[in-house]
């Protein structure tokens, strides 16, 4: 798939967002934290987890968002995270109120990328018997 060329208006919007992100990062370095007005308008992100953004490899958040001004209530992958504080996260596009972190981390595939089916299980030495050593038919009858 070929990516289209951005219009001058889109390029200007990107620069506006970058300038806003730079200004916010400068305020954070000076000890800024979101105020009541910013928190009141922020969408709520629940069952979130930190991941790598698929487009630029920077940290982002995934989870169930409620009250997003453009997307409503749905599952999202946020834009890259600029800063995370106690109960909130600031991405390159907006501020989020953080709910509960995701309780279980799902890895790629059923076992996870590069992880053996036997990882984390205790080793059971074969006890002999017919068939191939180590196969299920080598285990003693219950």
Image (cartoon, rainbow, N blue to C red):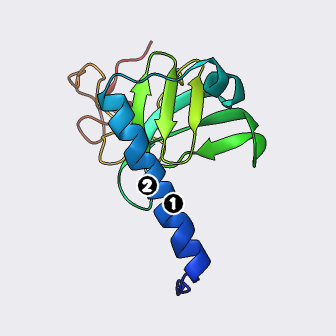
Specify few, some or many for label 1: CA neighbours under 10 Å numbering under 14, 14-19, or 20 or more.
few
- In the rendered image, residue 12, in percent from the top left (x then y), is placed at 53, 71
Q: Is residue 59 shown to the viewer in this render? A: no
Number of marks in picture: 2
- In the rendered image, residue 102, in percent from the top left (x then y), is placed at 54, 25
- Disc 2 + disc 1, Cβ < 8 Å: yes
Which residue is drawn at the image coordinates 31% and 41% (left, top)? 115
Q: Is residue 20 shown to the viewer in this render? A: yes
Asked if residue 70 is positioned above or below residue 2 in the image, the reply reads: above
Task: Indicate the secondary structure of the residue bearing disc 1.
Answer: helix
Task: Indicate the secondary structure of the residue bearing disc 2.
Answer: helix
Picture quadrant of residue 51: top left
Specify few, some or many for label 2: CA neighbours under 10 Å numbering under 14, 14-19, or 20 or more.
few
Q: CA distance from mark 2 to mark 1?
A: 5 Å
Describe residue 9's horizontal placement relative to residue 54 as left or right: right
**Numbered label attached to residue 19:** 2
Q: Which residue is mark 1?
A: 16
């Amino acid at each position: 798939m070929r990516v289209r060329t951005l219009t001058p208006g889109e390029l200007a919007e990107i620069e506006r967002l970058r300038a806003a992100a730079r200004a916010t990062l400068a305020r954070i370095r000076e000890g800024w934290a979101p105020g009541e007005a910013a928190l009141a308008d922020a969408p709520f992100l629940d069952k979130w987890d930190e991941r790598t953004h698929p487009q630029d490899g920077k940290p982002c958040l995934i989870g169930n968002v409620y009250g997003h001004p453009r997307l409503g209530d749905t599952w999202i992958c946020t834009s890259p995270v600029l800063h995370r504080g106690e109960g909130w996260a600031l991405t390159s596009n907006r501020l989020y109120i953080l709910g509960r972190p995701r309780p279980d981390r799902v890895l790629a595939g059923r076992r996870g990328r590069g992880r053996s089916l036997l990882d984390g299980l205790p080793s059971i030495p074969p006890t002999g018997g017919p068939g191939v050593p180590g196969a299920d038919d080598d285990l003693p009858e219950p």
